[in-house]
Amino acid sequence: DLKKEHNVYSLDAQKIALELGNSKVLNSVVLGYAAGHIGFDKEKWLDVISSTVPQKTVDINKKAFICGYEA
């Protein structure tokens, strides 16, 4: 019923996160997917990820975001 009045998007973010080797980056996949559909600037979000996630997880979170953004 939501599709009648709203744009509804579907993404298997867990599958993408597992393909990246870390199920914990699921949220970054979803964030990237949402950002891509809303029109948010990808580079700005990558900067936000770099400054907010633990340093040792920056690369994997960026990869997850990009996978979601490009999905």
Image (cartoon, rainbow, N blue to C red):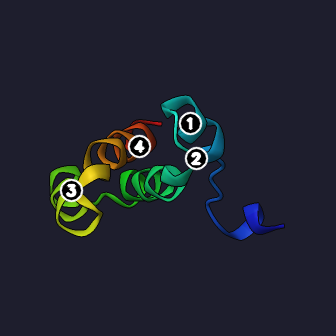
Q: CA distance from mark 1 to mark 3?
A: 21 Å
Disc 1 residue type?
Ile
Q: Nearer the viewer, mark 2 or mark 4?
A: 2
Q: Which residue is mark 1?
A: 16
For image coordinates 74% across by 61% down, the residue present is 3
Q: Which residue is mark 2?
A: 23
Q: What SS does tag 4 mark?
A: helix
Question: Would you identify the image quadrant in which residue 14 lies?
Answer: top right
Task: Tell me, yes or no, whether the two marked residues, 1 and 4, touch with CB atoms within 8 Å.
Answer: yes
Q: CA distance from mark 2 to mark 3?
A: 25 Å
Task: Tell me, yes or no, whether the two marked residues, 1 and 3, touch with CB atoms within 8 Å.
Answer: no
- Which numbered disc flags the more N-terminal residue, 3 or 4? 3
- Residue 68 location in percent, x, y? 45, 44
- Which numbered disc flags the more N-terminal residue, 1 or 3? 1
Task: Tell me, yes or no, whether the two marked residues, 2 and 4, touch with CB atoms within 8 Å.
Answer: no
Disc 2 residue type?
Ser
Whether residue 16 is visible: yes
Q: Which residue is mark 3?
A: 41
